[in-house]
Amino acid sequence: MALGIAEIIILGLLVDWIARRLKVPGLVGMLLLGVVAGPFVLNFLQPGILDISHDLRLIALIVILLRAGFELSRRALAKVGRMAMLLSCVPAIFEAAAITLLGPTLLGLTYMESAILGAILAAVSPAVVVPLMINFIEKRKGVEKAIPTLLLAASSIDDVFVIVIYSVLIGMYTGSGESVAWRLAGIPISIITGIAAGLLIGWVLYKFFSRFNPRATKRVLIILGVSIFLIKIEHSLEGLVPFAALLAVMGIGVIILEKREHYAHEISSKLGKIWVLAELVLFIMVGAQVNISVAWHAGLMGALLIFLGLVARSVGTYTCLFGSDLNIRERLFVVISYLPKATVQAAIGAAPLAAMKAAGMPTQPGELILAIAVLSILLTAPIGAWAISLTGDLWLEQAPEGDYEAVEAAKESD
């Protein structure tokens, strides 16, 4: 396994450097490296690394969500709260509805099977969106209107919403006895419990750090350990209490930033250094999950369905921005930022197939759903990441130098 990690580091850094020289986001190169080096093409990666791929991706995702939390200030969140809640569900509903209606015609699936596919495809990828938004915050692009903050918050809740809807649909399809009403109620409950737990734990950690003042490196290790435990708690509570652990992870950073900004900046800086390795692991491992042959079988009809779903999603995203102070270019940037697929599609794309096998049902629909999920990653993750970087640099306004948060606080006190 040590050799596998060395391969990821060396090849990942090389590909990242080449991609940046070509003016392409580094994560695009890492995703493509994962596809090529993964078990479905060259099979170059060490088997030991692939065996723990899920855990590695989870830890890397925790790192980037923690970084996101430490960038989510209360003032910025208050500014975009209404739009963030709309973006967390409306675009997904538009996309899933379009795929549900078009799936029977384009792919020969039933409406229920198309709805399951729509739920899987309707999730935006925080693995792609979050690091790019943090990069824009660091460059102070779009921060005066809190555009990166809007996308950080909305994309994370979007995944919770979509995964719960998927669980409802697959339960109905396979005849699971769990109450549909209870599963639907789990959407707001999981969001509320996740945010509440994150804020509470963040407050406890803030008090602990203030009392004992450990070094910044130890603070980071403590927060990472607590975050991993939160994921374990989510699995333990499954079926009992809906709980969104990834939202709790982000909530830790929000409260520490609010209570002790100096701590937050120190921790965020340390997490930024960890992210150099975590980024390589996350995107190469996500790419390694992509089965090119499965995606190929989806064909042109699969690609057309994905495209039409994205058109519907874009309409839903733009609708959410009515009444905002964003100009046309900024609104289009939000639309583009809400297109990439990767995280959820890689995580649950094969789940319907497994559920159908377990229920003794025909597996052909599950195989087709997997193929479309894989194809969506190939088509949207690299292009989406490149488009977000390009349009963000061109269309988002550069905030002036100075403490923007201090300026906002002064405005509130006037």
Image (cartoon, rainbow, N blue to C red):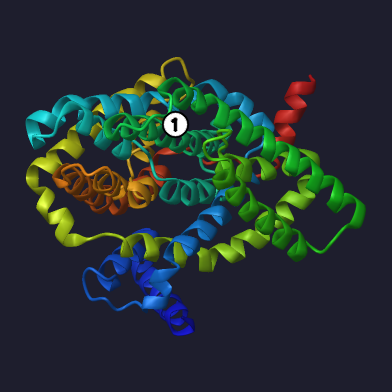
Question: Residue at left 46%, top 78%?
Answer: 5
Question: Residue at left 65%, top 40%?
Answer: 251
Query: Whole-percent x and y of residue 370?
Result: 23, 49
Q: In the rendered image, is residue 134 in sight?
A: yes
Q: In this orientation, which residue lies closer to the viewer: 110 or 5? A: 110
Q: Quadrant of residue 158?
A: top left
Q: Is residue 310 left or right of residue 70?
A: left
Three-letter amino acid code of the residue under disc 1: Phe
Q: In this orientation, which residue lies closer to the viewer: 33 or 13? A: 33
Secondary element under disc 1, as helix, strand or loop, is helix
Reading the image, the residue beneath label 1 is 161
Q: Is residue 51 left or right of residue 55?
A: left
- Whether residue 134 is situated above or below residue 31 in the rendered picture: above
Q: Looking at the figure, which quarter contains the C terminus?
A: top right
Q: Residue furthest bottom?
A: 3
Q: Is residue 242 left or right of residue 118?
A: right
Query: Whole-percent x and y of residue 334?
Result: 40, 34
